[in-house]
Amino acid sequence: MSVISKERNTVDAVPNVDNVLEARDMVKTFGNVVGLDGVDLELRRGEILAVIGDNGAGKSTLIKCLTGALVPDAGELRIDGERVDFKRPQDGRDAGIETVYQTLAVIPALDIASNLFLAREIRRKGLLGSVLRMVDTKAMRERAAQAVQELGIQTIQNMTQAVETLSGGQRQAVAVARAAAFGSKVIVLDEPTAALGVKESAHVLETIQQLRQRGLSVILISHNMPHVWQVADRIHVQRLGRRVGVLDPAVHTMSEGVAVMTGASTMDEIGPGGDG
Amino acid sequence: MSTATLTAGDLIGRRRSPAQRVQHLLHGHPWVSPALILVVTVVVFSMINDRFAEPSVQSLLIQQVAIVAALAIGQTLIILTAGIDLSVGAVTILSMMVMAKLAADHGVPAPLALLVGLGLAVAAGALNGLLVTRVNLPPFIVTLGTLSIFTAVALIYTGGTSIQNNRLPGLLNWTGDRVSIGEFTVTTGVLVVLALYVVVGFALSQTSWGTHVYAVGDDRESARLSGVSPRRVLLSVYLVAGLIYGIAAWVLIGRAGAASPNAISDANLDSITAVVIGGTSLFGGRGGLIGTLLGALIVQSFTLGLSLAGVDDHYRLLAVGALVIVAVSADQWIRKARA
């Protein structure tokens, strides 16, 4: 019997309160294409959970189902043990989950402050805000500058700069700053280092560790095994729309990870992790 | 390169040619180029014929531009969302004919007739908006269809006949009342259109709704992932545009002195022309109302200036056509600007 089927049998009943986010039997299909084929995922409080898998394994689909960007066909999702049903990205954000998408989901023509506060604009105080619905541009710029500073990003100074005038690394920083500023529970990052150089990647990894120090839980999707092994507490391995195992980076090696990810080995063959 | 201490950042900052600087300025302020074109247009036509600058001629220009300028507000909103509205004129005519016929032929009190006309324009906008957001049809196709439908309904309803203003109540003719401001004489309709510019301009630049309109137009999926509801924003834009066309219908009664189902046949293209010359990008997310007002004024200045100069109206068409091509080419160039 595999590790997975054991877990499956013990599911349900009492939700584990150590898990800030818990997904069970998530299914998502696109026509005849199966994106997720009954995936389970647990994210423990204050950990960095990496999600690895080959192209088409369903990583992006999985996180989109966790954040409200996609609505799964079946399965249940719990935040702090409470059942939730996300219908749109805003629902996930309202529940304290922030996502840095691979595409970054920033608006090129808008400035940095407007992007940071998109769909969460700060209104002016008094009648200007309540009756005329005026936004407080000044306050948003100040708080945007603060959010960027907190992440130690020095290359961005001017919050009135349009995002399209920024470099790839700077755009990434804007998206991460937005997630960090608003995420109260979970931050999901989809391939945050894929488009970055060595120095910029190192900075993003540092930022991810900072987020954990602040008590946030992080889901990191990455193709880059050294990056994953550098920061992750546990590693969820996704293959053909399912979870094939959870690795412990302190016990398992990168080559074992790749072997499980590609189907060359199974979890039974490589053995469980330290706490598994 | 002389020194090794020069960083790439310094280079970017220093090696900016004058052309790049202009490109950058225009990128940040899309209304600058139409403003320059308008100034040049006015100066040139004033030199050709000094009557052009007279208050009476300028007053006429402002009165003539009011309808297209009003319609162009709605058109700007829709083009900002990367859409296009071909049904502008048809919605306006339908709304106007219903207002006029209800009041003139059916004895409906003027305020009620006006409200029904405005409501119908909003409903027409809602139909466009629902077809775009719920049936997911391209705005071009939706409004091409509703252009014919609304035109046909207006013609069927009126039997193709006009209603003169002597048969209309005072409220519907009110937009034609003259107002003198110094040496200039405009109509109350012109003031209504200016008020529309102020209100919609405020909403676009100072409220969340405005930011969301730009966001959805620039990158719909990113806006959705950021928590904006593109459907809701798009629908609201078509509703607001409908209301603006309804108000324009009221202004048109005052301007034309009658309600005619064959009026403003060029309104669709004229409103798009004003928006494009005003620097709003047909790809969405870029531009604004100041540019649109300037664009409408440029086209009308060409019309009036060339006719004062005794030039055949066909040349005006030629000039406006060339200007549209230049404006869109400029937009393509400006969009390439980077820091």
Image (cartoon, helix red, strand yellow):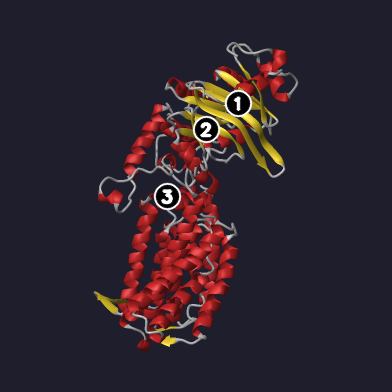
Q: Which mark is residue A169?
A: 2
Task: Find disc 3 in the rendering and name its residue.
Answer: B211
The amino acid pointed to by label 1 is Val
Can you say whether B251 is above or below B230 in the image? Answer: below
Q: Residue at x 68, y 12 (%)?
A: A271
Disc 3 element: helix
Residue annotated with mark 1: A51
Q: Amino acid at mark 2?
A: Gly
For the residue marked with disc 3, what is the amino acid? Thr
Residue B302 coordinates in the image, percent (x, y)? 45, 73
Q: Secondary structure at mark 2?
A: helix
Residue B183 point in image, percent of width and height: 26, 76
Which numbered disc flags the more N-terminal residue, 2 or 1? Answer: 1
Query: Which chain letter goes with mark 3?
Result: B
Q: Residue at x 52, y 32 (%)?
A: A169
User: Where is the C terminus of chain A found, in terms of image quarters?
Assistant: top right
Chain name for mark 2: A
Q: In the picture, residue A178 is in which quadrant?
A: top left
Q: Do marks 2 and 1 share a chain? A: yes
Task: Please identify, in this view, whether the residue under mark 2 or under mark 1 is nearer the observer.
Answer: 1
A271 on left or right of A227: right
Please rate how many residues cluster around mark 2, counting C-alpha atoms within 10 Å: few if below 14, some from 14 to 19, many from 20. many
* Mark 1 or 3: the one toward you: 1
Q: Which mark is residue B335?
A: none
Q: Is residue A5 above or below residue B142?
A: above
| Real-space CA distance between mark 1 and mark 3, rounded to the nearest whole angstrom | 34 Å
In this rendered view, identify the residue nearer to me: B62 or B258: B258
